[in-house]
């Protein structure tokens, strides 16, 4: 019997592959759990020794942001505050967290862990769970519904869970590493066509959509697009059109219930996202820069065996966005796999294979962005994405990340091919030897390496001991120096510590977030600069203190009044995410602006308003 890519599961499991023996499957299940956890721990191993004192080298700013989101979410829920809008940053305007990545579900579920051990530990636990959970969720979908052979399912799950894109986003992206949501959503989408169960299936999928929106809204959008492309391609295959028409009414009813449930659960977050204060349209990132280089598909990722051997190319816009980077050997293998499966699949059962190939092709082209870029050179040649880019929602997404849709498709193809080869090995001895060699040559270079990590400045005793409460009233404004931004995120780490250790609240004038103020109404990172934070940020980066006179001091007084600052604080050690902070120059500049500071614990402090 041929091992063919199965059609989407139908009612009562029609067409499902035969199940392996229960004992064999349990052994493979245990192996899948062990392999996933070991690999996840291996990739994140640089953080385990000291979660609070270590940071991801290439993205410590996002790590600080997610730690803050976990601490703030736990604090907001436990104190009855709004978890989707805060005035603790960007004083006095606040921050709309619905248009940022609020990860509210994670913050609520893991609140006990955050209060017990702190936000950095929670961050690391979720990151490990995301990586291992993604591999396990895909293994489950493959082994229970899609392929006969559990070893093939395990290969597919591990490839997807620890693919170059996933390892790249493991550089502090708790949203994009939550890939475990995708196979569960895909499974529930396919279940919508079950007759007589459209209401229950629609409700379940609606709840899943709401959860996914909270954790990774952009990823949910890409999943919905991918499901739409796949199902359309499958339904339009001539042998499947009659079946598609017959199941369409049930599917549509279930999808309607899904939309109603998700809309009910997400009514306020969606209003806040599209109509609430501090909203913006589009994104603060350049879509030409954040488009996938065509050559990147054949390149090797930095944090892999091939990358460790010096074969990385630097074709990503930054180290957290290696969204394809499959390597040329894997691309060659995928072509061979597609040919193998096409030949071994009966013409009337090619709908799934055809739909997978179409989905991969569509998202590959879209990931290239508005114009062709190859080996880092913009050609000016337009691509289909340029027509879609102005559309709502799409205008807020980064095209390069559409390549992440291609990864599960490749994993499914690899799993189906391995199952087919194990079920019916090639008769030709050379072919029997060539296939294992091909899989090894394609996959071994992609074996992940640990993330690069670095030491970060400790949170000062002024914060950990709670001394700040003697100088800033609860809910007052503490202004860290340099002003908190993505490149200088310590202020949010201080806040996260205070919130997760139940010390109380203090706000900060700036922060790392996406908000309004970009060109043409688009978003920008952080607040619109004012004279004083612009001056201090430049000093922190360059170490050069410009002439400071009466005009600069008057502007500083105005800015401190606008921000409602109670105290300004400079720690002895300050972490810079992209460059070393010039602390001594910053101390000189702040002294010229604000006058002599007082020494409190391990910080320099300028009291602006009377101490509480």
Image (cartoon, grey):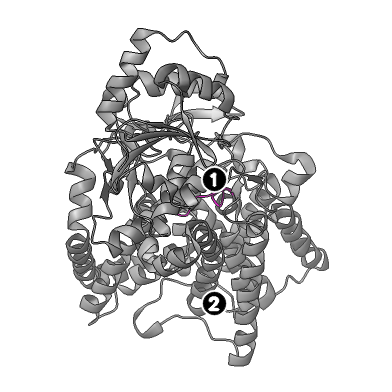
- Label 1, residues with CA under 10 Å away: few <14, some 14-19, many ≥20: many
Instruction: Residue 200: give x, y in percent of width and height.
Output: 24, 78
Whether the magenta-drawn stretch holds residue 5 is answered as: no
Residue 40 found in image quarter: bottom right
Asked if 520 appears above or below 411 in the picture, the reply is above
Q: Are marks 2 and 1 in contact (CB under 8 Å)?
A: no
Q: Which residue is mark 2?
A: 143
Quadrant for the N terminus in the image: bottom right
- Above or below 593: residue 16: below
Q: Position of residue 277 (x, y in %)?
A: 19, 40
Q: Residues within 10 Å of mark 2 (few under 14, many from 20)?
A: many
Residue 537 on image: x %, y %: 47, 24
The residue shown at (17%, 42%) is 275
Q: Residue at x 31, y 21 (%)?
A: 557
Per the image, the residue denoted by label 1 is 323
Q: Secondary structure at mark 1?
A: loop
Q: Which sits earlier in the primary sequence, circle 2 or circle 1?
A: 2
Quadrant location, the C terminus: top left
Q: Residue at x 46, y 81 (%)?
A: 16
Position above or below: 333 against 417: above
Q: In the rendered image, is residue 602 in sight?
A: yes
Residue in front for this viewpoint, 223 or 280:
280
- Region rendered in magenta: 168-174
Q: Residue 378, can we see it?
A: no
- Using residue 214 as the reference point, say whether residue 599 is left or right of it: right
Query: As rendered, which of 497 and 288 lies closer to the eye?
Result: 497
Q: Which mark is residue 554?
A: none
Magenta highlight: main SS:
loop
Give the alpha-carbon distance from disc 2 to disc 1, as whole Å. Answer: 26 Å
Q: Is residue 487 rendered to the left or right of residue 437? A: left
Question: Which element is circle 2 on?
Answer: helix
């Amino acid at each position: 019997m041929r091992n063919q890519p199965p059609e989407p599961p139908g009612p009562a499991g029609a067409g499902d592959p035969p199940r392996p023996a229960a004992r064999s499957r349990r052994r493979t299940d245990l192996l899948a759990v062990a392999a996933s956890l070991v690999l996840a721990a291996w990739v994140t191993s640089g953080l385990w020794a000291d979660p609070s004192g270590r940071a991801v080298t290439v993205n410590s700013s996002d790590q600080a942001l997610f730690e803050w989101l976990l601490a703030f979410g736990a604090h907001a829920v436990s104190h009855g505050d709004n978890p989707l809008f805060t005035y603790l940053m960007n004083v006095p305007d606040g921050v709309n967290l619905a248009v940022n990545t609020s990860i509210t579900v994670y913050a609520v579920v893991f609140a006990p862990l955050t209060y017990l051990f702190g936000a950095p530990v929670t961050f690391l636990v979720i990151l490990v769970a995301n990586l291992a959970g993604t591999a396990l969720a895909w293994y489950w979908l493959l082994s229970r519904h899609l392929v006969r052979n559990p070893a093939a399912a395990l290969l597919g799950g591990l490839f997807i869970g620890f693919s170059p894109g996933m390892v790249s986003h493991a550089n502090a992206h708790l949203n994009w590493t939550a890939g475990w949501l995708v196979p569960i959503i895909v499974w529930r989408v396919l279940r919508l066509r079950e007759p007589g169960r459209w209401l229950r299936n629609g409700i379940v999928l609606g709840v899943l959509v709401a959860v996914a929106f909270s954790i990774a809204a952009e990823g949910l959008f890409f999943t919905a697009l991918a499901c739409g492309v796949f199902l359309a391609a499958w339904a339009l295959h001539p042998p499947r059109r009659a079946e598609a028409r017959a199941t369409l009414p049930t599917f549509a009813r279930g999808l309607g219930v899904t939309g109603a449930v998700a809309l009910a659960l997400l009514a306020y977050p969606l209003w806040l996202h599209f109509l609430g204060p501090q909203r913006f349209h589009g994104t603060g990132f350049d879509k030409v820069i954040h488009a996938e280089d065509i050559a990147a598909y054949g390149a090797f990722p930095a944090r892999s065996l091939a990358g460790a051997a010096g074969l990385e190319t630097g074709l990503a816009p930054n180290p957290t966005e290696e969204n394809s980077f499959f390597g040329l050997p894997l691309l060659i293998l995928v072509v061979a796999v597609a040919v193998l499966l096409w030949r071994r699949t009966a013409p009337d059962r090619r709908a799934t294979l055809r739909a997978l190939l179409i989905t991969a092709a569509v998202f590959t082209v879209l990931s290239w962005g508005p114009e062709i870029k190859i080996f880092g050179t913009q050609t000016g040649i337009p691509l289909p994405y340029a027509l879609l880019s102005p559309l709502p929602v799409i205008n807020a997404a980064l095209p390069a990340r559409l390549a992440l849709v291609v990864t599960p498709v490749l994993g499914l193809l690899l799993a189906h091919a391995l199952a087919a080869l194990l079920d019916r090995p090639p008769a030709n001895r050379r072919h029997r030897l060539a296939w294992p060699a091909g899989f090894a040559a394609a996959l071994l270079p992609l074996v992940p390496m640990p993330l690069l990590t670095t030491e970060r400045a400790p949170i000062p005793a002024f914060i950990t001991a709670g001394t700040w409460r003697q100088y800033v009233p609860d809910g007052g404004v503490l202004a860290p120096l340099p002003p908190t931004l993505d490149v200088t995120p310590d202020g949010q780490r201080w806040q996260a510590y205070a919130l997760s250790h139940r010390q109380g609240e203090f706000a900060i004038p700036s922060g790392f977030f996406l908000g309004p103020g970009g060109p043409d109404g688009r978003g920008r990172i952080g607040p619109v600069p004012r004279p004083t934070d612009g001056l201090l940020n430049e000093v922190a980066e360059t170490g050069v203190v410009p002439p400071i006179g009466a005009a600069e001091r008057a502007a500083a007084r105005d800015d401190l009044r606008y921000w409602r600052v109670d105290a300004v604080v400079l720690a002895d050690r300050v972490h810079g995410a992209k460059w070393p902070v010039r602390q001594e120059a910053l101390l000189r500049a702040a002294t010229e602006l604000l006058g002599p500071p007082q020494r409190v614990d391990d910080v320099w402090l300028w009291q602006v308003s009377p101490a509480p």
